[in-house]
């Protein structure tokens, strides 16, 4: 940033302090917060300032509107007591193209990396699903919810081997997951409630087997099992799972997955257009550690998803994420054609959709395994 732009940026922030009444008065003199730095990148401008001793920090929150009036809605103001950072995002593109090579460094150190999007500072936000398990994604038609699912699943497939990750997909709308049907990592893609129930029955049996193994070897997590008994991570992803709400067996298994799945390496990603408190009961909500709220219908739905002000989002692809803190993010946009290109190396040619194995076969295998250990 050249000296004139720097001075202009500082003057704009001082004008904001004046409008917000953020100063101390000594006679005829005013003492404003001290601006320590102004840094600019392609995606954002970052201001660091400190309040003078004696200025009530509550004025920052009370007069936040002044920052919005001067800098627009694409801002983020962090800090407490004295030191604050104001990030003002440059005019964001209508779309944030999905770029795996750009994303990859942010998830290289994670066991199951989830890239969410970029924040108002222009920085990618990512997390490890093994640490923050289970995701809820909600949003109206056209808000970007389905694209986010496509992006998350594609990234998982590109970063893990089939021996390290298995995907169980439920596509209640029959519109999205056909893309993944022949991918090596994908055990099955089902849309009817009866097939999804069978799929979840298999996952339930896997949960029981893993629980037996951790108890047998006296470990607290499947990652700590002896190498010969390691199991791949499992991600169960169900789009529009609200359509399954009347099936008590399905809902019971989903509740069990989100309650105990983390230590057993089984994770859930659930999505829905119209959040309902009846479907998202307290047990499920309490264990969905990450919520992504794209454009929602009203404040009630925003509260159900626990993504404040998601109903006020104006543009597709933007969302509020609530995990260890609340973020305002723009999701990567992965077009269907691009996703097919990225997934092509993982396709198994001329392969029929995988069928869920009968319960009797799995139980027999378990019995043999346990007998062998005894």
Image: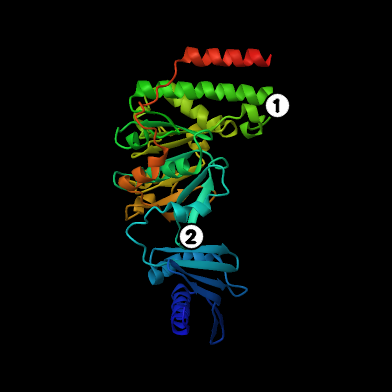
Answer yes or no: is residue 76 visible: yes
Residue lying farthest to the front in this orientation: 349
Instruction: Using the image, determine if residue 257 lies above or below residue 32.
Output: above
Q: x%, y% of residue 185? A: 45, 34
Q: Which residue is mark 1?
A: 218
Residue 169 at what x, y percent from top left? 40, 32
Foreground residue, 314 or 153? Answer: 153
Please indicate whether residue 237 sits to the left or right of residue 50 in the image: left
User: Residue at image x 36%, y 55%?
Assistant: 97
Which image quadrant is residue 83 in? bottom right
Q: Residue at x 44, y 15 (%)?
A: 358
Residue shown at the point (44%, 18%) measured from the top left: 357
Residue 196 pos. (x, y %): 39, 25
**Residue 15 position by quadrant:** bottom left
Q: Nearer the viewer, residue 72 or 303?
A: 72
Please identify the quadrant where the C terminus is shown. Answer: top right
* Residue sticking out furthest to the bottom: 28
The residue that disc 2 covers is 123
Q: Is residue 120 above or below residue 337?
A: below
The answer to whether residue 337 is above or below residue 233 is below
* Element type where label 2 sits in the image: loop
Q: Is residue 308 left or right of residue 214?
A: left
> In this figure, which colouring scheme has been used for the structure?
rainbow
Q: Secondary structure at mark 1?
A: loop
Q: Please tell me whether residue 204 is drawn above or below residue 19 in the rendered image.
A: above
Distance of mark 1 from mark 2, alpha carbons?
Answer: 41 Å
Q: Is residue 297 left or right of residue 251?
A: left
- Mark seen at residue 43: none
First along the sequence among labels 1 and 2: 2
Could you classify mark 1 by the number of other residues whose Cα lies within 10 Å: few (under 14), some (14-19), or many (20 or more)? Answer: few
């Amino acid at each position: 940033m050249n000296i004139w732009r720097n001075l202009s940026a500082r003057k704009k922030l001082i004008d904001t302090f004046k409008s917000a009444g953020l100063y101390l008065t000594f006679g005829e003199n005013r003492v404003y917060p001290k601006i320590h730095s102004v840094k600019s990148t392609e995606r954002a401008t970052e201001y660091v300032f400190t309040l003078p001793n004696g200025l009530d920090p509550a004025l920052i929150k009370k007069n936040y509107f002044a920052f919005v009036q001067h800098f627009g809605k694409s801002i983020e103001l962090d800090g407490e007591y004295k030191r604050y950072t104001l990030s003002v995002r440059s005019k964001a593109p209508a779309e944030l193209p999905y770029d795996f090579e750009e994303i990859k460094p942010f998830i290289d150190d994670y066991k199951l990396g989830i890239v969410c999007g970029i924040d108002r500072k222009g920085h990618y936000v990512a997390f490890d699903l093994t640490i923050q398990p289970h995701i809820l994604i909600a949003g109206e038609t056209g808000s970007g919810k389905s694209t986010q699912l496509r992006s998350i699943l594609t990234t998982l497939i590109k970063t893990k081997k089939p021996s390290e990750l298995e995907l169980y997909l439920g596509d209640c709308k029959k519109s999205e997951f056909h893309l993944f049907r022949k991918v090596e990592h994908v055990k099955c893609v089902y849309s009817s409630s009866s097939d999804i129930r069978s799929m979840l029955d298999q996952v339930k049996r896997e949960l029981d087997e893993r629980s037996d193994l951790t108890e047998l070897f006296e470990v607290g997590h499947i990652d700590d099992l002896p190498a010969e008994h390691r199991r791949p991570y499992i991600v169960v992803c169900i789009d529009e799972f609200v359509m399954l709400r009347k099936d008590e067996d399905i809902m019971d298994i989903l509740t069990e997955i989100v309650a105990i799945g983390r230590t057993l390496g089984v994770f859930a990603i659930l999505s829905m257009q119209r959040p309902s408190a009846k479907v998202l009961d307290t047990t499920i909500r309490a264990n969905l550690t990450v919520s992504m709220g794209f454009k929602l219908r009203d404040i009630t739905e925003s509260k159900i998803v626990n993504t404040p002000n998601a109903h006020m989002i104006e543009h597709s692809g933007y969302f509020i994420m609530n995990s260890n803190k609340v973020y305002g993010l723009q999701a990567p946009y992965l077009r269907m054609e691009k996703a097919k290109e990225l997934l092509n190396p993982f396709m198994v040619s001329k392969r029929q959709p995988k069928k869920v194995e009968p319960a009797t076969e799995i139980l027999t295998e378990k019995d043999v395994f346990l007998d062998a250990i005894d």
